[in-house]
Amino acid sequence: VSGRSFAGRARVLGDDINTDYLISSSRKKDSLDPDVLRHYLLEDLDPSFAASVQHGDIVVAGRNFGCGSAMEVAVTVLLGAGIGAVIVKSVSRTYWRNAINNGLLVIVADTSQIVEGDLLELRFSGAQPDLYVGASRSLRIECEPVSDFTLTMREAGGLVPYLRQHRKLA
Amino acid sequence: MSSSFFQDTLQAMPAPGKTMAEKLLSRAAGKDLRAGELAICEIDAAMGTDGSIPMALDYLQQMQPEGAALPGPSLVGRVYFAFDHYGPGSGARALGLQERARAYAKAHGVQRFEVGEGIGHQLMMELGLVLPGQLVAGADSHAVTYGALNAFGTGVGSSDLAGILQCNQLWLKVPGSLKIRLSGRLSGDASAKDVALSLSRRLGADGASYLAMEFDGPGVETLDMDDRMVLANMSVEMGAKAGIFPFDACTAAYLDGRALRDYEPVHADADAVYTGTLDVDLSVVTAQLALPHRVDRVVDLENAPETAVEMVYLGTCTGGRSKDFREALEVLRAGGGVAPGVRLIVTPASEAVRQELQAGGLLAEFEALGAEIQAPGCGACCGSCGSIPSDGTRVVSTANRNFKGRMGNREAQIFLASPRTCASAAVHGRLVDPRNGRAL
């Protein structure tokens, strides 16, 4: 993570985006393949959303992102759609776990000034992400530092590579 | 002042007591833990469903060296697979995913709850597979239900379930605890579901985020085990990591004849530190209703908008136990049956619940009223099997979530309420306060 940066277009959602909104349970029963599921991303909230996603888009949301069901396809569907990161005011604990385990970057920050389509740039120095908004990077938004554990998991690539290498957590 | 002054003072002061969550996770991690600390915990039992196991098996395969076969579970005999999300109507693909989970269970001797036996959470409780003092993980968010039995029950995803299969370990941050201090006794037609909805109304959908909700106070002993399961179950709708009840005579009585092993309950210390305390007087709780499409968009039933109802759903891990059906049936009897044009769906949470209803003649009564009796399981709760509501249908349900599309159709509207309120809606074909029969 250290020293990395990436940029993307803000795709702004509201508060309490539950996992059923991210991907419907009734889609999950037919396929677990992110390449299939990405076509149904957020369909119950906005049926046109999935088709509008571009690789590298950054999902920006309010409070309690990923609440509800613990289903992990709600994380892999974003990865499958090419979403580079999620920036939220807060995130539900099951979603946070699943995101860390799959290497999806979740950044906590006050997202209220970000609007749909804003160009965002995330830069990291160590555990501290910096978020810049706008083509001229005129606005800098403070982000919560990423925990050591999150960094360890991210450096390993997620829980799967970690356990493939170490066999146990401790 | 020097830092050594603070260190000396700290050493002189006894450490404050612990919450139930701190004690439960300290035990599971084998070390002294406090809220905020991250620990690697050993699991006492784990449950996965056909909704989460197939993806877990993919992760488990990826955790193996190239070309290696899938290993059996690390903790033999304490992993349970529940085939509760998918049934005969779920389609060939869902049944294919379920079959993968079944094949793994057969190959590795994992105990499974077959289609129609019931909801995994309910079976874990009924069969004594969750015990006080334990850490039990479920690859399904409503694993928080286990907290009713003084255990730390928490929901995880498929990758964590794969990790548990691989090494029986789970990384967990010890949560702070929010004390829910209960006093009084439920009166009139109010039920545990109304308490859960009023908590959601007060706390909001993230009001207990990352926290353990610990129930306490003199009101606890007035709640039976079914009530406790409802409250523990719904704690996740406020974002909680666990919803934990103290151990008492009610817990012991429930486990008598069910528990297959010895157990060691935990009790919160009198000087435990909480993030906050919420007082709930059970005696003033009235019928509550969650409006579409939010669990925390809750109003008093008597202030609900005029609403016609086309479907009433009795079931799920929140509202599918015998007591729920008994209460609903009382209202249906008193009201003279189901209004024309209303579909009444009955989905017992388990086969044991179904048998109890059958033995008591309740199932026959529901049938005589025109109810559609469905096989025990998750049913239509998340739209993966059972009766999906049609476009425009307004559903009043004993379930736990009313997100748009939750029951498999985004054009339906879901209201959440107690079994009595649901039954009252079935009688009148619209939302009616069951206390006075007044149409709203």
Image (spheres, helix red, strand yellow):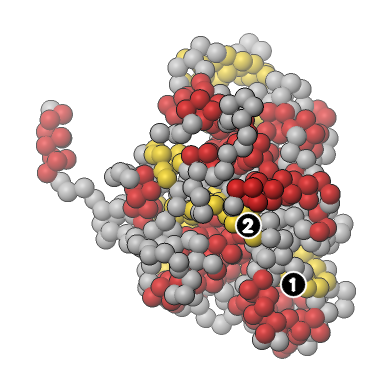
Image mark 1: chain = B
Which label number is shown at residue B57? none
Amino acid at the residue labelled 1: Val
Q: Is residue B316 visible?
A: no
Q: Is residue B160 above or below residue B193?
A: above
Q: Which residue is mark 2?
A: B112
How packed is label 2: few (under 14 Cα within 10 Å), some, or many (20 or more)? many
User: Could you tell whether B94 is left or right of A122 in the image?
Assistant: right
Kindly state the secondary structure of the residue where label 2 is placed: strand
Residue B409 in picture, x, y percent from top left: 81, 53
- Tell me the CA gap for discs 1 and 2: 24 Å
Task: Name the residue rendered at 38%, 65% in the picture.
Answer: B262
Task: Name the residue rendered at 15%, 35% in the picture.
Answer: B6
Amino acid at the residue labelled 2: Arg
Q: Which residue is mark 1?
A: B346
Q: Nearer the viewer, residue A21 or B2?
A: A21
Cβ atoms under marks 1 and 2 closer than 8 Å? no
